Image (tube, rainbow, N blue to C red):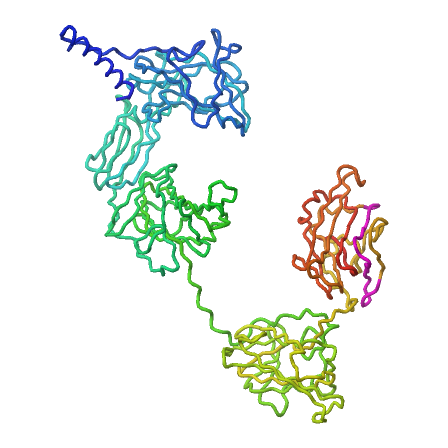
Amino acid sequence: MHPRSSSRHVAALVGVSLILAACSRDISSLDLAPFPSEPGVFGDGYAPGVSFQAFLGSKVDAVAIDPGIKFRGASALKITIPSFGDPAGSYAGGAFVSNVARNLSEFDALTFYARASRSATLDVAGFANDNTGESRYTAQRSAIPLTTSWQKVVIPIPLAARLMEERGMFFFAEGPENGVGYDVWIDEIRFETLGTIRNTRPAIASATLSGEVGGTVNVTGTTVTFDVDGLDVLVAAAVGYFTFTSSNAAVAAVTATGAISVIGPGSATVNASLGETAATGAITINALSPPTTAAPAPTRAAADVISLFSNAYTNVPVDKWSADWDMADVSDVQIAGDAVKKYANLSFAGIEFLTQTVNATAMTHLHLNVYQRNTSPLRVKLINFGANAVFGGGDDSEHEVSVSSGLTANAWSTVEIPLSSFTGLTARGHLAQMIISSGSSTLYLDNVYFYKAPLPPPPPPASVPTTAAPTPTRPSSSVISLFSDAYTNVPVGTWSAPWDDADVEDVQIAGNTAKKYTNFTFAGIEFTAPTVNAAAMTGFHVDFWTPDATASPATFKIKLVDFGANGAFGGGDDVEHELTLDAASTPGIRTGQWTGLDIPLSTFTGLVTRGNLAQLIFVSDPNTVYLDNLYFYSNAVPTAPTTAAPTPTFATADVISLFSDAYTNVTVNTWSASWDNADVVDVQVAGNNVKKYSNFVFAGIEFTSSPINATAMTHFSMDIWTADPTASPAIFKIKLVDFGAGGVFGGGDDREHEITLTAATTPAIRTGQWTRLDVPLSMFTGLTTRGHLAQLILVADPNTVYVDNVLLHK
């Protein structure tokens, strides 16, 4: 019984009690007063007792009485549909509710007249919605066409006998169309008996549903089609208008509200009728028994797990397994002695652990065991509240993953999702919510936990290197090389002296030559004719690789011998020193990887002279050793480059060159503008033309007479060389300036952007070597046009810089 009808009957009975007390009359034959059959809802104003109630989230002031535009009488209702983004509400909608229930059983339709400020489509209009959330007999039409002229809208009543006590007189909802709002006028809203509504065709949406014994399945998709003046009108009618029957009451029973209770296993067909008219469509129910076996027991180590729900672990606190805002019912059940979460009527479930958020930063995966009634994809969303642990605090992140493979119907499925799959989840230090959804309305959930996968055991060491030693990058001018494909080597008399105990051969590794020593005890390497003058050098380098164990007591010893001024062994002025390296030294030896051994020559303390180095002796505990890139080097930086910058290899058709011997250059007006603070001269470096900037603060390079159209280019590139320090705080800035379509500086459409490069950026600036600065033009974010580039401005902290190959390319 409707709540208001209850109070009405109570009031009537109270009145009867008073009469009995005063007169002792027999009132057994008295009837309660019927509900009024008033048809009007809105004419020139609201009908008596009718008020408008705006829907949640709608524009609350959308409805007003307009005396200016009306169908008939003095006024009409004007409804203002808001535009997208209107802070007052995202749509217009609400219910016209009577404070006294009405008996509408004698009518066959709700009618009204409507027009709009432009042609549009009204999303929905109907009746029997009293805005309580408990309306049982709603009926509505959707997508009602509107024009700028008045037209009558008819919404047939599916079964008027159901509306003997109804407070919901009229409702509507409409949002902006194509993001733009507009106005709608509605007039003469009333219930009528038209007598022209024929050919009633009720229907329910046919479906085959799986339900679990003890659960419920709700009928949806009930409609009625009417012939209204020769045109079909489709009305979405609430299930309350229909009467349902089950073909097998032992399997399924249906309530008046369309809830199908699954009573026992088996199959049943649910049919419907509207009054005496059978509805088309049917629902087949396949009733299933609950699971009888538990989910697989987890086997991961507890130290690697953060558990939300599992009998196998200690669980962290979870506030709710079904949040107030979700669409699911959850209960705790036991399956084969195991605690399980059962979700019924599931659309989506919100799991919240707000009180104590979860730090899953060290975890790698999310694990769940799910039991679904079908193989619909399981969707899982994780939400991180950020460092402030507050929703909406500005640092939230989230991501949803859909899992479709590996799911089995009516059986436990194990779902393991790498946390890296949640790509939008930029942090995992304060996880606070998990949202699950599925096409299975019943779902069981167990063993919900995060875990970190143990690191795989290291692979066994390779027996031979598969990659070459790193190519040296030191400038050749500061190197004396004994053996390296990267440099010109000095003469070496032997790589295995007759008096040593080792075998040596040259081998190819990824196209690079290396020395392979086997049966290695000690190896004598001699370069006596001529000896090596390393007096100006500061370090010794060798790349080392071995498949053998390098843990203690393994060692690798390096001895250098200088024959003195007479250049002869045993001449009385020989000096030498031996260093011992192991896995714990700096540098140290490693197994199965190339290790660069860089050793300051000052470490060889007994080597008091280095003008006539003649022998290098290795003593090795590893039996097999590969060696490459043996050279002496100096850390002293030359004052000017001795080699040319690498020649660019970009295709000529893809380049606009300002300065390069490799291409034809465009016109540049000046390489040092009158307003800059730098000196520039053209110099030759190894036969290549180079710009040398000195007294360098900033340099203005202008090509204003012929601006460059770099619209199709993707990168700016240049080679620089400096002897000055490039460690912090040294900087090198590049600014590009576009003069815009007017081609004039300061014309109002100029654009520019400057980037700053350091020793720590990519690309980076370096001391004592040519460095190619190849910069994507997308990094010049303020340079929104590139059709009329006219200036290049360089700002340098290094005082002297050599510049070559200044160009744009794609």
Residue 127 located left or right of residue 659 = left
Q: Position of residue 545 (x, y in %)?
A: 57, 76
Q: Position of residue 27 (x, y in %)?
A: 16, 9
Task: Give me the residue at 72% from left, 83% from top.
Answer: 610
Does residue 692 show up magenta in the picture? yes
Task: Give me the residue at 62% from left, 72% from top.
Answer: 511
* Pick the front one: 636 or 659: 636
Residue 430 vs 17, above or below: the answer is below
Task: Give me the residue at 53% from left, 16% from top.
Answer: 148
Does residue 626 show up magenta in the picture? no
Could you tell me what secondary structure mostly forms the magenta stretch? strand
- Residue 810 in view of the camera: no
Residue 16 vs 753, above or below: the answer is above
Q: Quadrant of residue 14?
A: top left
Residue 25 vs 577, above or below: the answer is above
* Pick the front one: 537 or 708: 537
Range shown magenta: 683-706
* Pick the front one: 660 or 557: 557
Q: Position of residue 716 (x, y in %)?
A: 72, 53
- Residue 435 in view of the camera: yes
Task: Give me the residue at 61% from left, 82% from top.
Answer: 579
Q: Quadrant of residue 298?
A: bottom left
